Image (tube, rainbow, N blue to C red):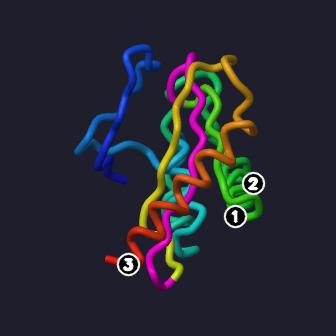
Amino acid sequence: MVYIERIAGTGAVPVLTRVGGRFALTATGVGLVLLAHAPAEVQEDVLGRPIDRYTSETVTDPDRVRHLLADVRTHGFSISERQVTLDAVSVGAPIHDARGRVVAAVSLVVRYGSVSPHALAPLVMTSARAISRALSIL
């Protein structure tokens, strides 16, 4: 996956991602969303390779990642807690094109322990829907 934009406030939690940079699909909020909606063969290709560990909390077991992906599809959002850095949690949601295909994802990264990720999910999902609507009228 490639990051195309990043907006950070003055007190934003530091992240390892950068605009134009790539990062593992299995560890981030946006990556989990994109992987959850990718074709099965793409998922199996990714999960058939070694999964990079960034922290002690990074999920590296393919079966556990499959469970996370199923949760994303069921609930409509992802949560990546302390998988990339120990001080961050990311909540992601899918962006759909006019045909309903997932073409991107948006996430909110906050300091771990500052707020419940489930409390952030409606905000992130609303943002994703707004971006999806804007894409459909272009």
Assign a secondary structure to mark 2. Answer: helix
Q: Is residue 57 left or right of residue 107?
A: right
> Which mark identifies residue 111?
none
Structural distance between the alpha carbons of marks 3 and 1: 25 Å
Q: Residues within 10 Å of mark 1 (few under 14, many from 20)?
A: some
Structural distance between the alpha carbons of marks 2 and 3: 34 Å
Kind of residue indicated by mark 3: Ile
Instruction: Provide the residue designation for mark 1.
Output: 73
Instruction: Provide the residue designation for mark 2.
Output: 67
Magenta stretch encompasses residue 95: yes
Q: Position of residue 111 (x, y in %)?
A: 57, 19
Query: Nearest the camera: 23 or 109?
Result: 109
Instruction: Give the residues in magenta.
Output: 84-99
Kind of residue indicated by mark 2: His
Query: Nearest the camera: 1 or 14?
Result: 14
Instruction: Provide the residue designation for mark 3.
Output: 137
- Can residue 48 be seen in the rendering of this structure? no
Q: In this picture, is 47 found above or below 114? A: below
Q: Position of residue 84 (x, y in %)?
A: 51, 29
Which dot, 3 or 1, sits closer to the camera? 3
Q: Position of residue 66 (x, y in %)?
A: 69, 57
Magenta stretch encompasses residue 134: no
Query: Nearest the camera: 58 or 128?
Result: 128
Residue at the far left in the pictured view: 20
Residue drawn at (76%, 63%), measured in percent from left and top? Answer: 74
Kind of residue indicated by mark 1: Arg
Q: Residues within 10 Å of mark 2 (few under 14, many from 20)?
A: few
